[in-house]
Every structure is written in structure tokens, then in C-alpha cells.
Amino acid sequence: MNITLLGTGNMGSAFAHQLHAAGHSLNIVGRDAAKAQALAARFGASTELARAASSDVVVLATGYGDAVQALRDAALPAGAIVVDITNPLTADYMGLTLGHTTSAAEQIAAALPGLHIVKAFNTVFAQRLAAGARVSATETVPVFVAADAEPARQRVAELARSMGFDVIDAGPLRNARYLEPLAGLNIYLGYGAGLGTLIAPTWLRQS
């Protein structure tokens, strides 16, 4: 796939590594042009904002507060598929600023109604993403995928699987209201409880 990555922080860098390893064509854009160019040079990627409009998928790897503006700057066409990995975290990262009746994903979708927003990867730490999907010979990190448009949900599921991740279909976008608190719990366990950043939540399924 042709993927545009918006963001060059820890998550953006981890995505670039895994997407490149999976054989995808990358276009990397960030607020710091020099940082974007340096990251792009590592993976043979382009750094053209205008190319975002023709990408198969756009990965939104910014903070929640920067998400809507980053997508507006990308000038994506109606129907573009956007992977929203954001969580609406408080300043100390130990709480959420939204919940119960809405979510970060729903707020982004409301601000940009022409786009297909797909919640995914928000429960995966950057360090876990960089380390890869495989935890052991029998364990693989899952990615929960929620979206209202079925084709968009399936496209992002395909993208996640191409990087080696398990996929759990989390239903419509409103279920981001559950996925974002799940990420909050993961952050507490990783940092607050000292379990580290290679952990990830999963669901057990009996065969």
C-alpha cells in the first residue's frame, strides 16, 4: 500500500520502521521538516504533503490536540481512510479528557465528516510497536479496529496484519469510547504500575 504517515514522534518512527519492513511505500510528513526528512531518509520515503491525498491509508500519528489541524493541512479527499491512533490524555498522561458520551475518534470524525476515521493501534505503546507484533512463539500483539465504514475497517485490518499483528474487530467507531479508556489503563499499568512499555492488552478466545 501507499501510506502517508502524519507525525514523526515515537509512534511515527515506530510505524515507519514496521511499515517499511512490511513492504509498504511510505510518505512521511511532520511539523519539523528536518526531522521528517531524516526519518524518511532511513526508509527511502518521500516527504511530500501533497502526496497524502493519493495515499491508500493515512496514519495519524500526532497527539490528539494536533490531529484535526494535521488532517486539514493534508487536504485529504472525501472518502480517504485515516487511522486514528490518538488518545485524549490529560497533561500527566494518567487520565482522559473525553469519555462516556464521545471519544477522540468521534470528535475527529465530526470535525472532518468526509473522511473515514478508523480507530486502531491506540492501545499499543510506541516501544511495543517498534519491537514488533510477535511477543513469543505463541503470542502476538492484537490491534483493535473500530470504524463505521466496513471497507475502511477491513483495509486497516489488512494493514495491521501485514505488519504481523493480530486483529480484533471492535465494531463501529463509537466503540472508540471503550478503546481509549483501555489505552488509559494500559498506560497506567505500563508507567504507573511499572510493568513497562512492552505490554499490550489482549482478549482470550477459546477455540
Image (spheres, rainbow, N blue to C red):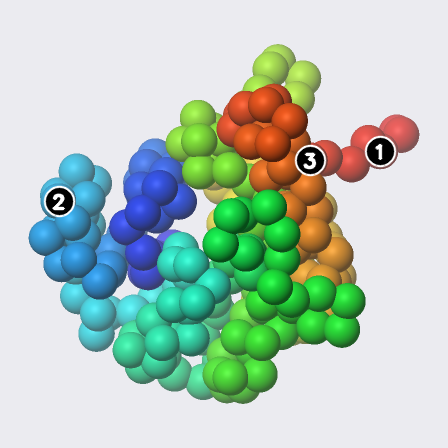
Disc 3 from disc 2: Cα separation: 32 Å
Q: Earlier in the sequence, mark 3 or mark 2?
A: 2
Image-quadrant location for residue 116: bottom right
Q: Nearer the viewer, mark 1 or mark 2?
A: 2
> Which one is in front, 153 or 83?
83
Image-quadrant location for residue 150: bottom right
Instruction: Report the amino acid beneath label 3.
Output: Pro
Mark linked to residue 201: 3
Q: Which residue is mark 1?
A: 205
- Where residue 155 sits: x, y (%)? 54, 59
> Which one is in front, 23 or 3?
3
Label 1–label 2 contact, CB within 8 A = no
Please tell me whether residue 100 is drawn above or below residue 80 in the rendered image. above
Disc 3 from disc 1: Cα separation: 13 Å
Image-quadrant location for residue 126: top left
Classify 10 Å Cα crowding around label 3: few (below 14), some (14-19), many (20 and above): some
Residue at the image position 45 percent from the left and 85 percent from the top = 78
Mark linked to residue 135: none
Q: Quadrant of the C terminus?
A: top right
- Where residue 75 sits: x, y (%)? 31, 81
Residue 172 seen in this snapshot: no
Give the residue furthest to the top: 137
Q: Which residue is mark 2?
A: 38
Instruction: Report the amino acid beneath label 2.
Output: Ala
Residue at the image position 36 percent from the left and 76 percent from the top = 69
Instruction: Report the amino acid beneath label 1.
Output: Arg
Q: Quadrant of the N terminus?
A: bottom left
For label 1, the SS is loop
